[in-house]
Image (cartoon, rainbow, N blue to C red):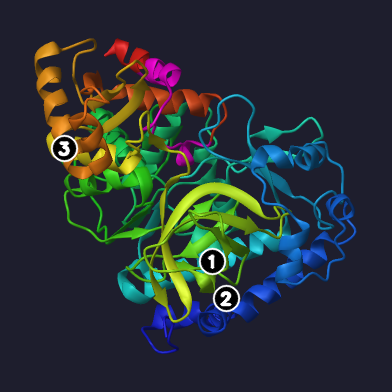
Amino acid sequence: MFFPPDGHGPYRLLRAFGGAPVERFHESLGAPEATQRARLAAIAAGAAGTAFARDHGLTGREDLAAWRAAIPVREHAALLPWLDRVEAGEPAVLTWAPVRQLVQTSGTTGRPKRVPVTDAWAESVAAAQRLWVLGLLRDEEALAGGSALSIVSPAVAGRTAGGVPFGSNTGRMFLAQPFWVRWRAPVPYAVYTIDDVPTRQYAILRHALAADVRSWTAANPSSILLYTRLRDQWWEELRRDLAEGTLGRTGARGLPKRALPEAPAWPWQLRRLNCWKGGPAAFFVPKLTAAIGADLPVREVGVTASEGFFAVPVDDGDPVAWLGGHVLEFVDEAGQVRWAWELEVGGVYRLVVSTEAGLYRYDLGDLVQVTGFAERVPRFVFLRRAGAELSSVGERVTEAQLQDAARVVCPEAVAVAACLRWAEVPNLRVAVGIPGSAPGPTPSPAAALSAALDAALRTINLEYDDRRETGRMGPPEVEIVPGAAWERWKAERVAAGAPEAQVKDPVVLDAARFEALRSLGAGG
């Protein structure tokens, strides 16, 4: 049993408050079919009578087979005929339940990608979040004390033309937490809504440094690394503000005081770090120990997206599918659609979800890999975005392989990105981000790095090795780019409206975006 009734006092108290999700989770482990049938019954009933239901001949009484037969798998763009009506404020388009707001997904360029929020959907996500928190507290009683630092973005950033509010899911989840959880947050929510990014980041650090932070949660591990660099950059100013009880950048006074050492350090009793660990995030996780100055456990925050919560890390193992929330389907590499209890260990699947907010058989475009089972329910991890690989002649270099190679040959690298150079003999163009490096080409070290990266990729990827051996691919061209380019990339997306806490680091790019990233390094 993942959540036994016995344990230390804070755990038992929290378990008593969160009993319903705990029971639903435990029941799903032995009876996943029944759990998913129950979730579909609720979701289908919420869709009955809507515009979407009329368009698809739905009655609201569909079983799992009928649901598949009536609704094709669709990506976000194919749902726009209905989502546009939701944004316009039209009721009963996808669900009878009112749409409370829209959450905007990360890293968008061009038209924002937004998905609806209903009360039932929010409760499913909150239930998964409670399981995650309960597992943390079960394993670490010290987390019941002190503060829990989270890096989030504003829950509401604006309104659509139809008057529907939209914003970040991290901010929405922060505000949806029980009052006693929000009370433990060292940073007031208002700080996360400051428009000027450097001022907001400084204020987050200033408030956090005044508290006894026990756990630090950020979707991206690169965000934790960023705040470490900002701490070092602003240390003298932060020391002065903490000593005087001020927030110099805003003129605020009367804030909590704290004495800080002369050299930059985290003055906390940190016990846990929580962040994404799969996909591109895997490049940054090994760097957290040096950045924090301690070898702390890092717990996955789950297989999640703005569209929902799909697998919960209930221990230090890989996340367990949350079948008591949304309806989950998995498309294998042959195109066959499977249910969670039909998966195989080691299998790679594209995740398709049906949610209480009106995303029906929605193709997330995320690839996950099954790593084991908890009774009859799969554990799986995020692998990469479908199509997030470089392949000109069948070499299929993935984000993870590119990052692994860069980590081996250039341990000081803070980021890496690549695109294809298309030619009769194509090759990879690679930008390696190094802190403090000079902008522009640096032929000698870059040439050595090119050879080393080529050798590492040939070891990691046999298809790449074959294409290099047979001359179908040329050697990679590596350029050293200031690490600040990636920070500027993210800042531009935040300025364009993407939630700061969720913006993903660019790794696999097309040629135009690769050039855009390089140009951001021109300022040093």
Which residue, given by chain and number where applicable, does mark 2 sit on?
Answer: 21
Tell me if label 2 and label 1 are in contact, CB under 8 Å.
yes
Q: Amino acid at mark 1?
A: Ala
Q: Amino acid at mark 2?
A: Pro
Query: Looking at the figure, which quarter contains the C terminus?
Result: top left
Q: Secondary structure at mark 3?
A: helix
Which residue, given by chain and number where applicable, does mark 3 sit on?
Answer: 456
Q: Is disc 1 surrounded by few (<14), some (14 to 19) or many (20+) residues within 10 Å? A: many
| Part of the protein shown in magenta | 499-517
Where is residue 14? Give x, y as percent: 49, 77
Residue 182 is inside the magenta segment: no
Q: Look at the picture and state if 366 lies above or below 271.
A: above
Name the N-terminal-most of marks 2 and 1. 2
Q: Amino acid at mark 3?
A: Ala
Camera-side mark, 1 or 3: 3
* Label disc, if present, on residue 388 of the rendered structure: none
Q: Secondary structure at mark 1?
A: helix
